[in-house]
Image (tube, rainbow, N blue to C red):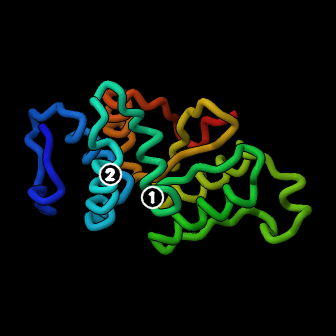
Amino acid sequence: MSFSSDDFDHEHTFDDDDDSLDAYVWQLFLMINPGDDDSAFQQFTAYREVVSDTPDEDVDVAQVVRQVADWRSAFYVGAEDTRALVQAIEELASRWNLSIDWDGDTDEDEFHADADTSGLLGTAYDQLAPHGYTLWVLDTDDDSVAGWMTLSRNVEPMRELATELGIHLHRGNEMG
């Protein structure tokens, strides 16, 4: 199933039987933008523009989603850049008026000298879980950390969807 931006209705829903790449990607954008259909639609539209001339089998969904959703509903930072990781996660959490208690002053150099990526991801995961959100981390092919957040009730649907899309991911508390 393929739609042009002109004929894609913001309120359109794919059929339950639709196993097209577009249908799966649309579901992914809905999951990483819980309660924010406008952002999901904008990111889905941007995704479709990026992949417009690419055959489905050649699309790297995770890479394109990171590209069009970065710092809005996804993050992608260098594995050693703990400052950027903290900022990115805080930006995503702020969408739901949540804040992370990092157990230290993230503006201080000493905090980042002692911090490691897996510890920060675990802290963020633990801080988001009581509010009903799950932090996901994607496997990347480079020295980076990427991920997004979903509602915790969508853990199994996210795992199933990621499998369909060929995205390897795990919860933030499963790092390291």
**Residue lying farthest to the bottom in this orientation:** 97
Give the image quarter of residue 173. top right
The count of marks equals: 2
User: Which residue is painted at 28% across and 30% down in the image?
Assistant: 56
**Label of residue 93 in the image:** none
User: Which residue is painted at 35% across and 47% down in the image?
Assistant: 50
Q: CA distance from mark 2 to mark 1?
A: 9 Å
Under mark 1, the amino acid is: Ser
The secondary structure type at the circle numbered 2 is helix
Q: Are marks 2 and 1 in contact (CB under 8 Å)?
A: yes
User: Which residue is painted at 14% across and 41% down in the image?
Assistant: 2
Whether residue 131 is visible to the viewer of this picture, yes or no, is yes
Q: Closer to the camera, 174 or 7?
A: 7
Pointer 2 or 1: first along the chain: 2
Q: Residue tagged by mark 1?
A: 73
The secondary structure type at the circle numbered 1 is loop
Q: Residue tagged by mark 2?
A: 29
Instruction: Find residue 11 and report its horizontal and vertical position in percent.
Output: 12, 61
Q: Residues within 10 Å of mark 1 (few under 14, many from 20)?
A: many
Q: Is residue 98 above or below residue 83?
A: below
Q: Is residue 135 above or below residue 17?
A: below
Under mark 2, the amino acid is: Phe
Instruction: Find residue 157 and report its horizontal and vertical position in percent.
Output: 31, 38
Q: Is residue 159 above or below residue 93?
A: above
